[in-house]
Image: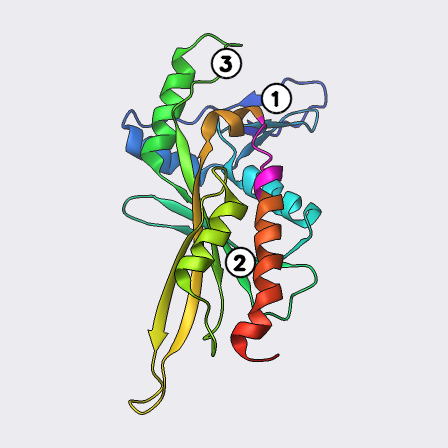
Amino acid sequence: MVLPVTGSGETPITEIPKRSTNRACRFIEDLKQDSVVHGVDGSLTPVAIIDVPGFIADLKDHAVDHAFHVHDERHFIETYSMRQAWEIDLHPEDACGGPLDLHLSLEVDPRIMIGFEDKMLAIPEGDDPVEGFSFPLAFTWTLPPLRYPPDLLVLATELAGMGGIELPLEVSAIDSFASVTDAAERSLTIISRIEVGLDRIYLGQEQMCDVLDTCHNVSIWLLERAAIWLGEN
């Protein structure tokens, strides 16, 4: 931290806080520190090697650029394991009233973060960042109970062609009964899990434009058929 001084021409007093030698404790200490250091000239210098909150902010901005509306964001930290999760609720910009919900979730494992940090500190400055470290990012689409649900096998086949290798899509369903005499109502869930490379986040190259375009296409495709499945048409 930089401490203020009374004289305008004097050199600022810099205090370097002591850090624990234990890596788990060090990660906890990093969470308690600000993500930037304020320089004397007003500049901001990043402290963490990977700026996860900055990546989430960029992801939301890119989602807006790709015709989504951001409705909510949540950040969770487990007090024991220090695992973190960022969750974002999205809708296509022309379907904010439903019935489709899209949920993004990024999970941050502190062991992955510490491992990447140790590797980066061990390589010469200016070298390319190490590969092989990533965080899982999940996209989840949900629909309310459907009166006329589609055939799951046909739906999974059609969605697989839309998502391709870049965005593999899995289909699941839950049948619910309001009472023992009522017919079953089926709720659909479509989920895709991809890996976000820490090296690409470090270089600022993880823009995910193609993924967001595919997510929007899948969302519109589901919305076009949701009215029939819900029995509204």
Using the image, tell me which numbered label, if any, was put on residue 99: none
Q: In the displayed structure, does residue 7 sit left or right of residue 135?
A: right
Q: Which residue is at the far bottom?
A: 181
Q: Residue at x 66, y 28 (%)?
A: 6
Q: Residue at x 40, y 73 (%)?
A: 186
On screen, residue 19 above or below 130:
below
Q: Depth check: give the residue in front, 207 or 113.
A: 207
Segment colored magenta: 204-211
Residue 54 is situated, as x and y percent measured from the top left of the image, at: 57, 38
Label 1 vs 3, first from the N-terminus: 1
Mark 1 = which residue?
Answer: 12
Q: Tag 2's secondary structure?
A: strand
Residue kind at label 3, given as amino acid type: Asp
Residue 148 is situated, as x and y percent measured from the top left of the image, at: 48, 76
Mark 3 = which residue?
Answer: 128
Residue 80 is situated, as x and y percent measured from the top left of the image, at: 27, 47
Residue kind at label 1, given as amino acid type: Pro
Q: CA distance from mark 1 to mark 3?
A: 34 Å
Residue 231 is situated, as x and y percent measured from the top left of the image, at: 55, 80
Q: CA distance from mark 2 to mark 1?
A: 49 Å
On screen, residue 121 above or below 38:
above
Mark 2 = which residue?
Answer: 102
Task: Determine whether label 1 and label 3 are within 8 Å by CB.
Answer: no
> Overall secondary structure of the magenta stretch?
loop
Label 3 vs 2, first from the N-terminus: 2
Task: Determine whether label 3 and label 2 are within 8 Å by CB.
Answer: no
Residue kind at label 2, given as amino acid type: Leu
Mark 2 Cα within 10 Å, few/some/many (few <14, many 20+)?
Answer: many
Which of label 1 and label 3 is nearer to you? 3
Q: CA distance from mark 3 to mark 2?
A: 35 Å
Q: Residue at x 35, y 28 (%)?
A: 114
